[in-house]
Image: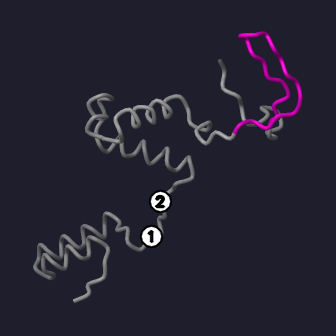
Amino acid sequence: MNKLPGQCPICHSDLEVTRVYCPHCDTAIEGHFAPSANPFGILNKEQMNFLMTFIRCEGRFNRMEEELNLSYPTLRNRLQEILKLLGFESKADDPLKLTPDERLRILDALATGEISADEAQVQLSGRKNEG
């Protein structure tokens, strides 16, 4: 069965369901129906398969790595892609989230003795030093 498109392929307006049909009892109902809200309807087949595997593996990437034969970073990227599509995008302006360059700067400062291991740990966690 084909997936119900969300927009008209001609003018890109929202579509409206006007007929539903039951192939089991050959009943058809006509009218104006709102399509059911399915937040996963925007996912393609590959993304839905990933999500189903994620659920089946109870969110354990180590099990998903074996089943899908993909690396942890690839799995993480695919999950982030799905989260973004569903509107759960992480906030880039989150002050507690460090960029890779910021992490490297902290580790370099630790390696050269500019900061202690405790201070590096505090900075890497994104917390302010309270001491």
Task: Residue at the far right: name it.
Answer: 31
Q: Measure how far apart labels 2 and 1 are at the Cα level.
A: 8 Å
| 122 in relation to 103, above or below | below
Q: Which label sits on residue 58?
A: none
Task: Look at 48% across and 70% down and name the residue there.
Answer: 93
Q: Which label sits on residue 90?
A: 2
The picture places residue 33, in percent across and down from the top left corner, at 82, 34
Q: Are marks 2 and 1 in contact (CB under 8 Å)?
A: yes
Dividing the picture into quadrants, the one containing residue 16 is top right
Task: Look at 78% across and 18% down and name the residue there.
Answer: 21
| 101 in relation to 119, above or below | above
Nearest the viewer among 56 and 46 is 56
Where disc 2 sits, the SS reads loop
Dividing the picture into quadrants, the one containing residue 58 is top left
Image-based side of 66 in relation to 17, left or right: left
The magenta segment: 15-36
Mark 1 lies on residue? 94
